[in-house]
Image: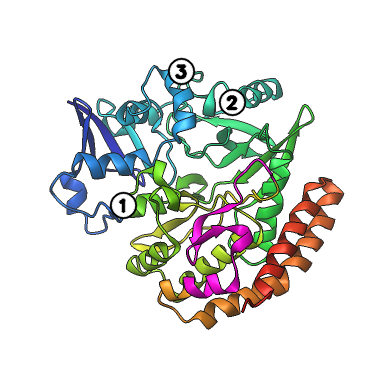
Amino acid sequence: METLNVFLLDKLAGYLESDNGKLSFRYAEKYLEDKNAIPLSFSMPLQKESFDNQSTATFFDNLLPPDTVRKKLGKILHLSRHNIFGFLKAIGGDCAGAISLYPSELENNADFQEQPHLRELSKEEAVEILTGLHRRPLNIGKENGFRISGSGAQDKLIACVTDGKIFLPLFGEPSTHIIKVPIKDYPHSVFNELFCMKLAAKMRFPTPDCDIFYLNDIPYYCVKRYDRKIANGKNVRLHQEDFCQLFSVDPEKKYENEGGPTVSVCFNLLKKVHIDIAGQIDFLRRIIFNFLIGNGDAHAKNFSVLYKGKTAYLAPVYDLLCTEVYDNLSHESAMSIGHEFNFAEISRQNFSNMAVECDIRAEIVMNQIEDLIGKIVPAATELANELNIKYPCPIYNDIIQIIKHNAMQLTIKKQ
């Protein structure tokens, strides 16, 4: 049997064990004795008994990159796509949120804490790494001590960024930023995401800082991690879960039409984890906003909760992209709105149906629709003017046209 020590907020929370490929997780006795202990997951409450293979594998699988990235990583690390334990042993030192995994022989993570934590990249190194991410995802397997398991299908580097300089976090140092490269088949993708994220901020959604930077005339999207903060002068992790982890859903089933959570299921779960009314309304506003900007990729892994002690609240928005602007992508929503996936067919009535499914009054959702469509076009136009001064790009206007079309679609009351 092999074992990995599982740390939560830098405390030894328990042990991930692999017995001939079958996984189990058990909390450490000392951790259970701590009255302030918090569970690893809503789906894995504090208990003395070990969790079985299915629940363990599903939760820890959600900490790893998706299948497309994992296949590339597997070739580098000589691991099969389904070897969850093997991947976490190799790259589990800096997962999303506050979870870290280390080989059990590294008692209390001491072997890592005594090593240098950051290494600055020269411009030449940064260019080499970022332009090579399609071959070596996350830069895994090249840098000693670089153990990061960032999720998401897009090529990205998980790093620390200070004053325009890029640093690799080594030996367990928390990363602070995610740097995304342009997506080959989707023109201006980095400007698309920047525009959608900045627009969300203008619409008063909680949003992490993000910007564009250039290396050798190539633009990169850089966003500050919302699951990190500065405490006593140090970068520290914040505990979080995406909705697939909350539901104990296989990450390959993150879309509703593949068996993933629906809007109403997500909404009702927010109540179960005691998200307040304001947070519940915020979630519904995010569903409306994603429709208005034509984001067909707002699936269960693109919504998360953050924990402050034992209290949960909605994490800031992230991974916003207008997918409707690309003809080679599906023009469907990741989660249906009132049983309708097709963007072109979604109406006010569908949102009214969604409200019924969520067991809230339809007029609450209608009021949020009116508020958002009354503000979004002026805000988007103002934003495009601002960004065109610093980062001129034609995609801003393309997205605005989609927003206008979708807003008009919700203005028309079908008989």
Residue that carries the numbered disc 3 in the rendered image: 76
Q: Residue at x 70, y 48 (%)?
A: 325
Residue kind at label 1, given as amino acid type: Ser
Let me know if residue 339 is in the magenta part. yes
Residue 40 at x, y percent in the picture: 30, 49
The outermost residue toward the front is 415
On-image quarter of the N terminus? top left
Element type at marker 3? Answer: helix
Which numbered disc, 1 or 3, marks the residue closer to the eye?
3
| Residue 162 in the image: above or below residue 124 | below
Residue kind at label 3, given as amino acid type: Ile
Of the pair 331 and 57, the residue shown nearer to us: 331
Let me know if residue 125 is in the magenta part. no
Mark 1 or mark 3: which comes first in sequence?
A: 1
Element type at marker 1? Answer: loop
Residue 343 at x, y percent in the picture: 61, 58
Q: Distance of mark 1 from mark 3, alpha carbons?
A: 30 Å
Q: Residues within 10 Å of mark 2 (few under 14, many from 20)?
A: some
Residue that carries the numbered disc 1 in the rendered image: 41
Residue 170 visible, this orientation: no
Q: How many marks?
A: 3
Range shown magenta: 326-354
Residue kind at label 2, given as amino acid type: Leu
| Residue 14 in the image: above or below residue 305 | above
Residue that carries the numbered disc 2 in the rendered image: 133
Residue 294 at x, y percent in the picture: 64, 56
Element type at marker 2? Answer: loop
Q: Residues within 10 Å of mark 3 (few under 14, many from 20)?
A: some
Q: Residue at x 23, y 55 (%)?
A: 45
On-image quarter of the C terminus? bottom right
